[in-house]
Image (spheres, rainbow, N blue to C red):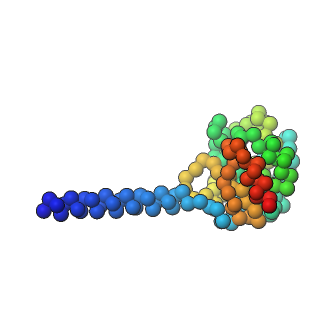
């Protein structure tokens, strides 16, 4: 009888482990190859130092799309994006921010000299349409609206990825 109980317990543990594995796989599923769905009707907060948002950016061949939930030191918005703006004029950089405090975002943009417009998305519409799993930030690098890779300026060779995107 004890041998039977040990077999049942082992079977249950294996089953639970498999279930957790598949749940984790689903939660971390890569969006590579997926079509991006832009949230086109959001409020735009334009930078005082850079270009104004142009809705044609949604249809640009090459896009770097950044979703950020917060403005902490670890936010994707805090990377130095300037060299990538300057070295890649054919790429449209589209930023979404889902924090609840619009004025905090405006102060942050001014205080940090952020050079690009940000789509203000407090209801996380972009996130709901494009992100699988739970994250406070993600970067989609797309060609013809299809996700090619997820790298961002935290990778020392990010420009190489952008060059590959443009090939």
x%, y% of residue 2?
14, 59
Observer able to see residue 43: no
x%, y% of residue 142?
73, 60
Depth check, front residue: 19 or 135: 19
Q: Residue furthest top?
A: 111
Image point (75%, 40%), residue name: 80
Relative side of 71 to 61, left or right = left
The number of discs equals: 0
Image point (84%, 47%), residue name: 87
Observer able to see residue 61: yes
Q: Is residue 113 above or below residue 16?
A: above
Q: Quadrant of the N terminus?
A: bottom left
Depth check, front residue: 10 or 78: 10
x%, y% of residue 56?
84, 61
Depth check, front residue: 41 or 145: 145
Image point (45%, 62%), residue name: 22
x%, y% of residue 44?
78, 51
Relative side of 72 to 56, left or right = left
Relative side of 36 to 91, left or right = left
Q: Is residue 29 above or below residue 119?
A: below
Q: Quadrant of the C terminus?
A: bottom right
Q: Is residue 85 above or below residue 55?
A: above
The answer to which quarter of the image holds residue 102 is top right
Image point (21%, 59%), residue name: 6
Q: Residue furthest left?
A: 1
């Amino acid at each position: 009888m004890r041998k039977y109980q040990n077999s049942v317990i082992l079977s249950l543990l294996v089953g639970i482990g498999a279930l957790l594995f598949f749940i984790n796989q689903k939660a971390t599923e890569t969006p590579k190859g997926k079509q991006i769905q832009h949230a086109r009707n959001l409020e735009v907060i334009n930078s005082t130092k850079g270009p104004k948002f142009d809705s044609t950016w949604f249809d640009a061949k090459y896009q770097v799309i950044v979703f950020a939930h917060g403005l902490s030191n670890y936010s994707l918005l805090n990377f130095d994006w300037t060299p990538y703006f300057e070295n890649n004029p054919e790429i449209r950089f589209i930023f979404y921010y889902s924090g609840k405090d619009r004025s905090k975002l405006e102060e942050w943009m001014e205080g940090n000299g952020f050079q690009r417009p940000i789509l203000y998305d407090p209801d996380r519409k972009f996130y709901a349409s494009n992100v699988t799993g739970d994250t406070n930030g993600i970067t989609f690098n797309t060609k013809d609206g299809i996700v090619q890779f997820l790298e961002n300026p935290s990778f020392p060779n990010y420009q190489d990825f952008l060059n590959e995107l443009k090939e």
